[in-house]
Amino acid sequence: MTEFQQPVLKSGFFRESMVVFNRQLRMNLRNPAWVLIGVMQPILYLLLFGPLLEPLIEELGGNAYNWFVPGMLVQLGIFGAMFAGFSLIGEWREGVIEAERVTPASRGALLFGRLYRDLLQILVQAIILVALGLLMGMDFKPVGILVGIAITVMIGGAGAAASNAFALLVKSEDVMAPVTNMLLMPILLLSGIFLPMSFGAQWLQTLADVIPTKHIVDAVRASFFGDLGVADIGWGVGWTAVLFVLAVWWGISTFRKENA
């Protein structure tokens, strides 16, 4: 009996998912390059693109970094998480998924153990990004920042669950890479992450309104400005919850089908 199999026989969902999480965490600690690469991208955007917003402060309203850091957080949550499935393809190719299938662990625990790793990684990266924003002069609103980080972690969990489900479905980096990039490009441009969509043409604003991530960016941005009313963050929190539930459902269903 393997080290993985023995504890799951006498445990529930949380214990099973923690066994998977501990293994995933050990793998990441052995090779922290991906964590560093993941956090360096938004930091570079903050350092190199943030100052370009200074001339737009009056039009943006308030502190430029209160405006820009929330966009970078959502970018971190979505873009970092959407590549989580690539490691799952590697595990499938090495036979790890097959080995986990013969254990009595629930398929939901196999997914959530990996989500715990992704959520922890996003949380650490988000804290680093916010700390850097504070050093660069961002206003300090503790409750708003906590709400913004919580939304970021949740949308990151949705992205990671969807990425794992898609990876297990296609089992090929050659398919996953172009499809992921094709989805992320319009999300990046139409969510108002870099510049407000109000700067664009009316047809672009109308198109952006139907993209859930635009409302999530608006919600995180509102929380950083201290606007915590339902009208300010309601749509963003609602869309985040819907996407998280749907992605987790897809992820668990895919793990179950893999077991069939």
Image (tube, helix red, strand yellow):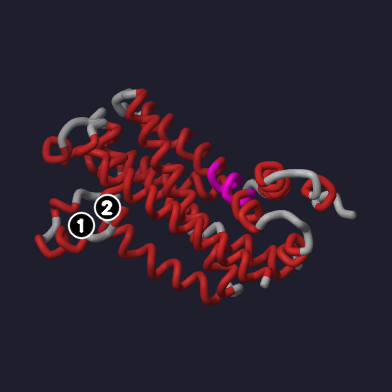
The residue at the point 27 percent across, 59 percent down is 211
Q: Main secondary structure of the magenta part?
A: helix
In the rendered image, residue 119, in percent from the top left (x then y), is placed at: 53, 44
To which residue does mark 2 refer?
214
Q: Left or right of 83: which side holds 114? A: right
Q: Nearer the viewer, residue 222 or 18?
A: 18
N-terminal label among 1 and 2: 1
Q: Amino acid at mark 2?
A: Lys
Tell me if residue 31 is in the magenta stretch. Answer: no
Question: CB of mark 1 within 8 Å of CB of mark 2?
Answer: yes
Tell me the SS state at disc 1: helix
* Above/below status of 96 relative to 176: above
- Residue farthest to the left, as pictured: 202
In the rendered image, residue 136, in percent from the top left (x then y), is placed at: 35, 29
Task: Report crowding for label 1: few under 14, some 14 to 19, many 20 or more residues within 10 A (C-alpha).
Answer: some
Q: Is residue 203 visible?
A: yes
The residue at the point 36 percent across, 41 percent down is 46
In the rendered image, residue 157, in percent from the top left (x then y), is placed at: 49, 49
Give the extent of the magenta segment.
113-119
| Quarter of the figure with residue 66 | top left
The residue at the point 63 percent across, 62 percent down is 88
| Quarter of the figure with residue 47 | top left
Q: Amino acid at mark 1?
A: Asp
Q: Left or right of 48: which side holds 10? A: right
Pick the quarter of the image with the C terminus.
bottom right
Q: Nearer the viewer, residue 190 or 243?
A: 243
Tell me the SS state at disc 2: helix
To which residue does mark 1 refer?
209
Task: Report crowding for label 2: few under 14, some 14 to 19, many 20 or more residues within 10 A (C-alpha).
Answer: many
| Quarter of the figure with residue 182 | bottom left
